[in-house]
Amino acid sequence: MNYNQMSDAEKKAELALLLEKYKDIKSQGISLDLSRGKPGKDQLDITTGMLGVISQGADCFSKSGLDCRNYGNLDGIPEAKALFSELLGIAPSRIFIGGNSSLNMMYDAISRAMIYGMGEGNIPWSRQGNIKFICLTPGYDRHFAICESFGIEMISLELGPDGPDMDEVENLVCNDPSVKGIWCVPKYSNPTGTVYSDETVRRFAAMKPAAPDFRIFWDNAYAVHDLTDNKIKLANIFDLADEYGTVDNILYFASTSKITFPGSGVAITAASEKNLAQIRKIISVQTIGHDKINQLRHVKYFQNANGVLRHMRHHAEIIRPKFEAVISALENDLGDTGIARWTNPKGGYFISLDITTGSAKRAWELAREAGVTLTNAGASFPYGKDPHDRNLRIAPTFPPLSDVKKASEVLTLCVRICALEGLLQK
Ligand SMILES: Cc1ncc(COP(=O)(O)O)c(C=O)c1O
């Protein structure tokens, strides 16, 4: 029943019933965790075979004859570039293969801009006074943490079902030279699962920023992380940018963290040849090269893009039931209450839940007291502050399915309690 249409007496009766249930759950002393956006053990297990593809010296040579045990190839082995190129539709000449983390590469990109300037010849960001980034909300907390740690002002814009409102983005980017960047997770966005429409991607590609050192931080972390065979295709921003002559505006990031092993995968930055020349020059001072044996391991294991896509189907088979369990709990317990709305992503790692304004922190706390850990309320917003205190991020991949089911029930119970408490206070 719709909570908003209940009489006060009905609300009180319903609340009493739910509190009774809550008390019972609390007494069970459960300990469940829906906070961690990482693969479960069963997912890691399907990639274990990769560890065996290099077991002796002779395995360490790439097809092009490179001995991957040695120094060299700062920006990666050609075979790994070819694999990412085929998978993501980006020319190998625009790919720089880094270490084990794309987040690390994003942090470094900003750090380099601060120290040396973004783009050859531009004034370092650290010497330009107050600079700003556009942050789409709800979004990825670690993007916002990078801005916060460098003192970059964050401008929040709400993420819509097709991406951000591009009128607002263009207005900021094309008129204000202190706006230096925007964080985008264009496919299966963290945490909403949003996929940017073709029109949104085209408008990003067409933008003519006011600042010469503005960059779109295109974090395609979930490029191949579809939950169903009905894959959603993201428009290729580099192809479109080539049409508009704007390719220097893009810094593209991806990794195999949630394809193989998080923390032991392979990450890339893709950028125009001009941007890559500056990136290479600076990184060549920082390192002689990244882990080529791991790059080769990935190449040998997957062979080609199809190998990766086949592997991703296995991941989907494992995690789809967990997403379905959360969605079905939300539908069953909150569907007709009129107090919540949620996303139903077709890929990625998260579900975003919006509940009654002003109650996310309280729901988070209630869940914690009942033994269910959720990502901190507000985490998906700049400075950790949800202006409406209504968003919760659900990460269903890590726990076993039975835990996901139980934790979802506890969560919806807490959400209902908070909503009724709020309504009765009005
Ligand atoms: C949007 C997004 N980008 C980047 C990362 C981290 O990627 P990596 O492991 O390559 O640093 C995550 C991890 O959750 C993510 O959600």
Image (tube, rainbow, N blue to C red):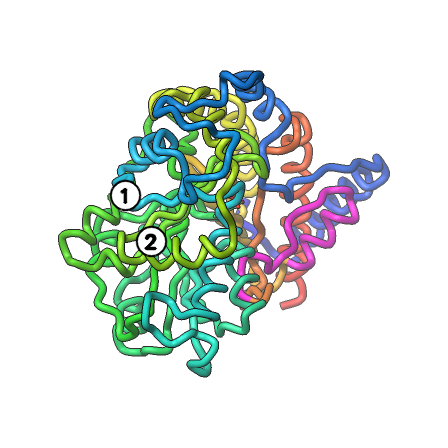
Residue shown at the point (23%, 56%) measured from the top left: 247
Tell me the kind of residue under disc 2: Leu
Q: Mark 1 points at which residue?
A: 93
Residue at 27% in and 77% down:
175
- Say what amino acid the circle numbered 1 marks: Ser
**Are discs 2 and 1 less than 8 Å apart at CB?**
yes
Q: Is residue 10 left or right of residue 140?
A: right
Q: Quick one: 290 or 6, which is closer to the camera?
A: 290
Q: Indicate whether residue 379 is drawn in magenta.
A: yes
Q: Name the residue under label 2.
A: 276
307 relative to 320 in the view: left or right: left
Q: Which residue lies furthest to the bottom in this view?
A: 129
User: Badge 1 local density, few (<14 within 10 Å), some, or many (20+)?
Assistant: some
Rendered residue at 49%/18% (across/down): 59
Q: Is residue 336 visible?
A: no
Residue 341 spot, x, y in % from top left: 48, 49
Q: Quadrant of the C terminus?
A: bottom right
Q: What stretch is highlighted in magenta?
A: 361-382
From the viewer's perspective, is 50 left or right of 13?
left
Q: Residue 148 lies in what quarter of the image?
A: bottom right
- Determine whether the residue tagged by mark 1 lies in a helix, strand or loop: helix
* Residue at 63% over, 37% down: 408
